[in-house]
Image (cartoon, rainbow, N blue to C red):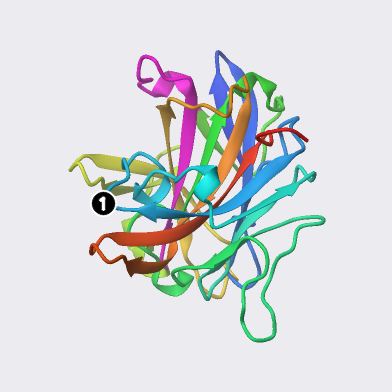
Amino acid sequence: MSNGKYTIIFRKNGTRYKICKIWFGADGSYYVTVPYHSAKKAMLFKHTVNYKTSVPHKIDGGELIPFSEALDIASSDDKRIKLSHHPDGFIQFSGFGVVSGKSPDGTIKGIGVQSWPLLGGCRGPAFGVTFLGVEQFEQENKQQNPECLFDQEELTVIPGTNGFVLEGHYFPVMWRRFIQTAPDGRKTISIVHPTGNILRLKVLLPPNECPIGGFMGLDLWSELVNFNGAVSGYSISSSTGNMRRNDKGELLGDGISCIYPRIGND
């Protein structure tokens, strides 16, 4: 039986590295955090994605705009910043010293966005964790319970890439009928990628008492990554919200991201 808390492990050349922690809250919210890297200072920002003009290789289908054009920027000295996606669709970053939540009138405080509610799920990715220089993440020498393991030897790494993207998809409870269980107990679910290829995602289940019952599917692939020249680091990106069209009819959406280590001078 799952307790709804998972450690995501990446194995490279036989060494196991802890990448991130994903868990489900008592109200059905899900949370993503990366407490296993030495970087402690981050940049958080809210940005706009243009789904027509952006190159579709970043989280949720679009490339981020430059920092100079970000809607909002903040920073943190807390290495345990977490991404939270709540049942009503509110997505935010929170952590020690970080402004978060909503005002009494519903106005979003800090770095957050109103996106899709969890009860119905969504088509496409819900969040992404991009990481570079896995050797600087904490090693794990004993089996975590539960854990989700990705092995580099099972991947077809694209030549010229230097990092990886872990992408999470969120599914409503009725999609549990499509989960398959392997003889060793590992659970997967298959979806159709926009290219027409079949993706087999590793499944993370919430605890049985979760009031929503939705679950997560994870995919991982290699990517060319550049965190301002850093040899190791990571980012966490959310799904988008506030969907709208500009005067050209192009579809826009707002998302939030954080990057470790912090870009620029301290």
Give me the residue at 30% from left, 53% from top.
51
195 or 237, which lies in front?
Answer: 237
> Element type at marker 1?
loop
208 or 257, which lies in front?
Answer: 257
Say whether residue 171 is magenta: yes
Say whether residue 28 is magenta: no
Residue type highlighted by circle 1:
Lys
Q: Is residue 88 above or below residue 181?
A: below
Quadrant placement of the C terminus: top right
Q: Which residue is mark 1?
A: 52
217 or 236, which lies in front?
Answer: 236
Q: How many dots with numbers? A: 1
| Classed neighbour count for the residue bearing mark 1: other residues with Cα under 10 Å, few (<14), some (14–19), many (≥20) | few
Q: Is residue 255 above or below residue 181?
A: below
56 or 5, which lies in front?
Answer: 56
Give me the residue at 61% from left, 82% from top.
106
Left or right: 236 in relation to 136: left
Give me the residue at 23% from left, 62% from top.
248
Q: Position of residue 61 (x, y in %)?
A: 34, 48
Left or right: 41 in relation to 83: right
Quadrant placement of the N terminus: bottom right
Left or right: 24 in relation to 253: right
Magenta-drawn segment: 151-172
* Residue 111 in sight: yes
Q: Position of residue 251 (x, y in %)?
A: 29, 61
Give me the residue at 65% from left, 35% from top.
263
